Image: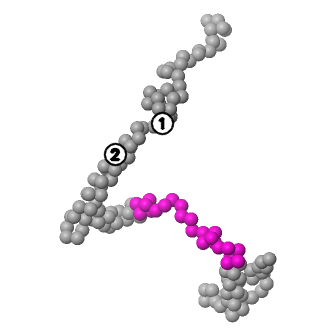
Amino acid sequence: MSIDDSTKQTVAKPRGKPFVKGGDPRAATGKQITGRPKGSRHSLSETFLKALVEDFTAELQEGETNGMFAIKKCREEDPVNYVRICASLLPKQIDVNPVKELTDEQLIERLTDLRAAYRAAVAGGVSDAGDRTLEADEDTLPPKLPALH
């Protein structure tokens, strides 16, 4: 075997047909076609959900449905999975920021109220846990708020 034979690189042959944008025969309308045919998954999901609702709401006993029975059984026999299911139904992220919608004036008013309540608690020696008393000194007080112009 010569040195030239061992250093030769093989060139991969192209497989299949090369991609041509808009090459789908359904694209004759000028619109780009992507994914599954429109409505195919929607119709399957709709059929499944209808069947699920019918089964879930079917009356099992007087006043109890299959769904109510299944939820009760899951809660009693597998509480960890029950909580997991409940949590999966909640939104992944909840925007709970009441400060976001406050104006600057409203925000400063709330902060001023909080500072006043904190000063009153410290000055009055209000106990936070019953075993120690808050003491007033300038290091523990929140800074004064800037004035609005």
Dot 2 corresponds to which residue?
A: 44
Within-10-Å neighbours for mark 2: few <14, some 14–19, many 20+: few
Could you tell me if residue 73 is visible in this image?
no
Disc 2 secondary structure class:
helix
Q: Nearer the viewer, residue 3 or 14?
A: 14
Residue 112 falls left or right of residue 98: right
Residue 10 falls left or right of residue 83: right
Residue at coordinates 59% horizontally, 16% vertically from top-left?
11
Residue 98, x across and y down, in percent: 60, 72
- Amino acid type at circle 2 is Leu
- Colour convention of the picture: one colour
Dot 1 corresponds to which residue?
A: 34
Residue at coordinates 31% horizontally, 49% vertically from top-left?
47
Residue 7, x across and y down, in percent: 65, 13
Residue 61 falls left or right of residue 48: left
Residue at coordinates 32% horizontally, 64% vertically from top-left?
71
Range of residues picked out in magenta = 84-107
Quarter holding the N terminus?
Answer: top right
The answer to whether 107 is drawn above or below residue 79 in the figure is below
Instruction: Report the Cα–Cα distance between label 2 and label 1.
Output: 19 Å
Residue at coordinates 70% horizontally, 74% vertically from top-left?
104
Q: Where, by quadrant of the figure, is residue 112 drawn?
A: bottom right
Quarter holding the C terminus?
Answer: bottom right
Q: Are marks 2 and 1 in contact (CB under 8 Å)?
A: no
The answer to whether 103 is drawn above or below residue 84 in the figure is below
- Amino acid type at circle 1 is Thr
Q: Nearer the viewer, residue 11 or 147?
A: 147
> Hey, which residue is sitting farthest front in the picture?
29
Could you tell me if residue 98 is visible in this image?
yes
Within-10-Å neighbours for mark 1: few <14, some 14–19, many 20+: few
Mark 2 vs 1, N-terminal side: 1
